[in-house]
Image (spheres, rainbow, N blue to C red):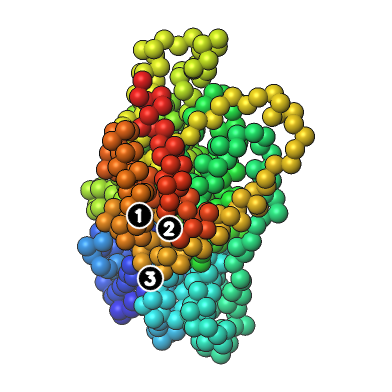
């Protein structure tokens, strides 16, 4: 007897529907599986047989043939266990065929019949919703993840009473069988669909880092505010103990909250990476990733035999903080070139090519020399050659892609001991949000969200310059020997400064301040 069950697969961060087809026939007992299967999927034969036995289901002496289509898609992972088991039960007549109609099933099976959590439930459930499937059966630990999709469906419909996709969480194979065998009107008594909770986008009470903790460094705070308002990449350069790391760790406290669509983007990446849990089914805060300088190229970019998102993609829509930037291997830093420009990263493997999103705000910090104290020759023991070699670890193309560069000087004792009330993160964030609203209004109906995202072809449209401003930009271009990319970045930063000032047009003051943030074209690297 032939039967089929709908399931899902994840390729990169995209999801596709798959069909588990099972044929139960008389003949020599056996269990065959086809469909370009990875080792984990092939091993499902033993897991499914033992799980069925321990769930008190007897498999008669029959020949089982399982095919997972489409055949051109490589199947990896253990999420096919539960749909294979259900398909066998359909073929044996244990479960009525009409009871699995329009139902997507995913889950890994333990030998005792336990249904274990799997990765990628969020994109799979979203794909099912878009395909018109009305029920998803997932592991109990993934149920809140799937319920987020139901919440999105209700918000799109604008009514809590709109019939939509059900999310059913099961913890054992026996529970799944009991639910699928029950009549439609009795199923709620077996397993009730979870409540669709409202995502929490508010500030976390435990969030303690605040800009009010930092004394002095007003110029650096201003640079950080400009960078946060326009989502610009920023480099802070200064001696040890000048507050660079403290500043970087507080940047998330002044960034705009994730929108619901952005939260879904980020959560999809974390779901594929297996970093969403029952307690956190949706990422509602902007990510902050701070890799150690010993990180490998693969861990930063993503990949592996079964490609997974790397740190770059996990920082999508958030902050990627790279402390002690020159200590990273040069080959590792060069990986940043493409995502800094294209906002995505390509990974090619034998089984296909994958594209992961990588639209992050790069925050980098570094010392001016190996010992950290240049140009203070009372402390610095580095030679000119050592300083040049140290700075040359950051290539010109990487520096050219950084919008804002600022020096963080040594903090004076009077600033440390001063009994003054510093601006809090809430104060700075309010100005950032106002600038963000101006950008949102300006870019409504376009692909852009922040000034930093503007393509070169659209700068003249969204950042027009007056005659005086254009003359000033030409002088700056010649004096600083800028590249075309650096020229456009100054204009984009000037647009952000104008937004913070509430100005409709960019003026000479905004351009002058933006030019001061191009220390990577002058300063230490011009030596």
Q: Position of residue 266 (x, y in %)?
A: 46, 58
Of residues 445 and 476, the one nearer the viewer is: 476
Secondary structure, mark 3, is loop
Look at the image and tell me whether residue 36 can be seen. yes
Q: Is residue 213 left or right of residue 191?
A: right
Q: Position of residue 380 (x, y in %)?
A: 51, 12
Q: What is the C-alpha distance between the residues marked 2 and 1?
A: 8 Å
Placement of 455 over or under 102, stated as above or below = above
At x 42% / y 32%, what residue is drawn? 519
Name the residue carrying label 2.
505
Label 2 close to label 1 by CB (< 8 Å): yes
Front: mark 2 or 1 = 1
Name the residue carrying label 1.
466
Of residues 152 and 455, the one nearer the viewer is: 455
Mark 3 or mark 2, earlier in chain: 3
Quarter of the picture holding the C terminus: top left
Crowding around mark 3 (Cα neighbors within 10 Å: few <14, some 14 to 19, many 20+) is few
Q: Position of residue 44 (x, y in %)?
A: 38, 59
Front: mark 3 or 2 = 2
Name the residue carrying label 3.
445
Crowding around mark 1 (Cα neighbors within 10 Å: few <14, some 14 to 19, many 20+) is few
Secondary structure, mark 1, is loop
Secondary structure, mark 2, is loop
């Amino acid at each position: 007897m032939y039967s089929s069950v709908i399931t899902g697969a994840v390729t990169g961060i995209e999801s596709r529907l798959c069909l588990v087809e099972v044929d139960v026939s008389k003949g020599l007992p056996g269990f065959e599986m086809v469909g370009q299967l990875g080792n984990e999927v092939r091993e499902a034969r033993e897991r499914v047989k033992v799980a069925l036995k321990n769930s008190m289901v007897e498999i008669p002496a029959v020949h089982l043939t399982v095919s997972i289509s489409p055949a051109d898609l490589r199947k990896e992972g253990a999420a096919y266990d539960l749909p294979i088991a259900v398909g066998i039960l359909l073929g044996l007549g244990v479960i009525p065929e009409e009871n699995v109609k329009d139902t997507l099933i995913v889950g890994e099976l333990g030998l005792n019949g336990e249904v274990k959590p799997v990765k990628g439930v969020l994109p799979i459930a979203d794909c099912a919703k878009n395909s018109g499937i009305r029920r998803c059966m997932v592991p109990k630990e993934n149920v809140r993840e799937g319920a987020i999709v139901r919440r999105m469906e209700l918000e799109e419909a604008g009514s809590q009473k709109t019939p939509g996709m059900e999310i059913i969480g099961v913890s054992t194979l026996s529970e799944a069988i009991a639910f699928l065998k029950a009549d439609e009107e009795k199923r709620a008594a077996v397993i009730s669909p979870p409540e669709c909770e409202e995502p929490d986008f508010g500030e976390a009470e435990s969030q303690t880092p605040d800009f009010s903790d930092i004394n002095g460094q007003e110029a650096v705070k201003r640079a950080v505010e400009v960078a946060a308002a326009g989502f610009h990449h920023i480099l802070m350069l200064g001696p040890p103990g000048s507050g660079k790391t403290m500043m970087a760790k507080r940047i998330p406290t002044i960034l705009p909250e994730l929108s619901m669509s952005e939260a879904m983007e980020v959560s999809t990446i974390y779901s594929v990476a297996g970093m969403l849990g029952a307690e956190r089914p949706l990422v509602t805060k902007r990510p902050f990733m701070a890799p150690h300088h010993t990180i490998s190229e693969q861990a930063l970019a993503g990949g592996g035999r079964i490609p997974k998102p790397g740190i770059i993609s996990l920082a999508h829509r958030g902050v990627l903080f790279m402390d002690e930037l020159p200590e990273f291997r040069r080959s590792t830093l060069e990986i940043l070139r493409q995502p800094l420009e294209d906002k995505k990263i390509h990974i090619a493997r034998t089984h296909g090519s994958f594209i992961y999103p990588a639209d992050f705000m790069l925050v980098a910090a570094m010392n001016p020399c190996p010992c950290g104290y240049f140009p203070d020759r009372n402390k610095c023991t580095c030679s000119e050659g050592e300083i040049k070699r140290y700075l040359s670890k950051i290539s010109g193309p990487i520096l050219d892609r950084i919008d804002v560069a600022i020096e963080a000087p040594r903090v004076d004792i009077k600033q440390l001991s001063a009994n003054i009330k510093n601006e809090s993160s809430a104060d700075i964030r309010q100005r950032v949000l106002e600038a963000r609203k101006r950008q949102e209004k300006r870019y409504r109906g376009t692909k852009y969200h922040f000034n930093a995202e503007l393509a070169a072809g659209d700068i003249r449209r969204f950042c027009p310059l007056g005659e005086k401003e254009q003359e000033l930009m030409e002088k700056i271009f010649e004096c600083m020997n800028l590249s075309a990319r650096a020229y456009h970045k100054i204009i984009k930063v000037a647009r952000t400064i104008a937004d913070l000032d509430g100005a409709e047009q960019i003026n000479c003051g905004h351009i002058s301040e933006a030019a001061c943030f191009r220390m990577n074209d002058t300063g230490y690297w011009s030596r």
